[in-house]
Image (cartoon, helix red, strand yellow):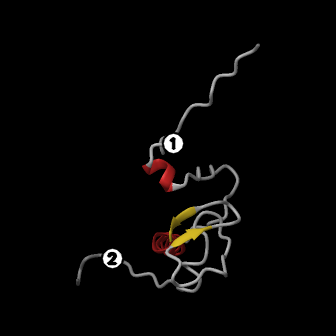
Amino acid sequence: MEGADREVILVNPSYTSKKCSNCGFVVSSLKLYDRLFFCPNCGWNIDRDYNASLNILKSGLGESVVPVEERPLLRVIPYIKVISGQVSPMSQEAPSVREG
């Protein structure tokens, strides 16, 4: 659409579905029929296509997937635990410490 004031950024698609969008580790053993992405390095568990889309977005925005100082790390929660109600995706306070 002309005049939409949008910018197109070309992104190299190599390894976008095999690279962990959380830590940057490349899982070379991932096969095309594997629909879930699991990172053996950091434990990130996510839909493969969604993982690739996050890598493409980060690449287009020029963001690094490697954490830098003073930037909090993502809290990794397997989505199945959120869906089943085992954990909440919301931030939680640290448990109180009891002496005794």
Residue occupying image coordinates x 47% and y 48%? 82
Q: Residue furthest top?
A: 100
Label 1 element class: loop
Where residue 26 appears, x then y in whole percent? 66, 76
Above or below 63: residue 29: below
Where residue 29 appears, x then y in whole percent? 66, 81
Answer left or right for 77 relative to 9: right
**Label 1 vs label 2: CA separation?**
39 Å
Q: Residues within 10 Å of mark 2 (few under 14, many from 20)?
A: few
Where residue 7 appears, x then y in whole percent? 38, 78
Answer left or right for 67 relative to 11: right
Q: Which residue is mark 2?
A: 6
Residue occupying image coordinates x 48% and y 41%? 90
Where residue 52 appears, x then y in whole percent? 50, 75
Q: Residues within 10 Å of mark 1 (few under 14, many from 20)?
A: some
Viewer-closest of 1 and 3:
1
Answer left or right for 8 relative to 72: left
Question: Which quarter of the image is occupied by the N terminus?
Answer: bottom left
Question: Which quarter of the image is occupied by the C terminus?
Answer: top right
Q: Which residue is mark 1?
A: 87
Residue occupying image coordinates x 60% and y 61%? 44
Q: Amino acid at mark 1?
A: Val
Q: Quadrant of residue 94?
A: top right
Q: Nearer the viewer, mark 1 or mark 2?
A: 1
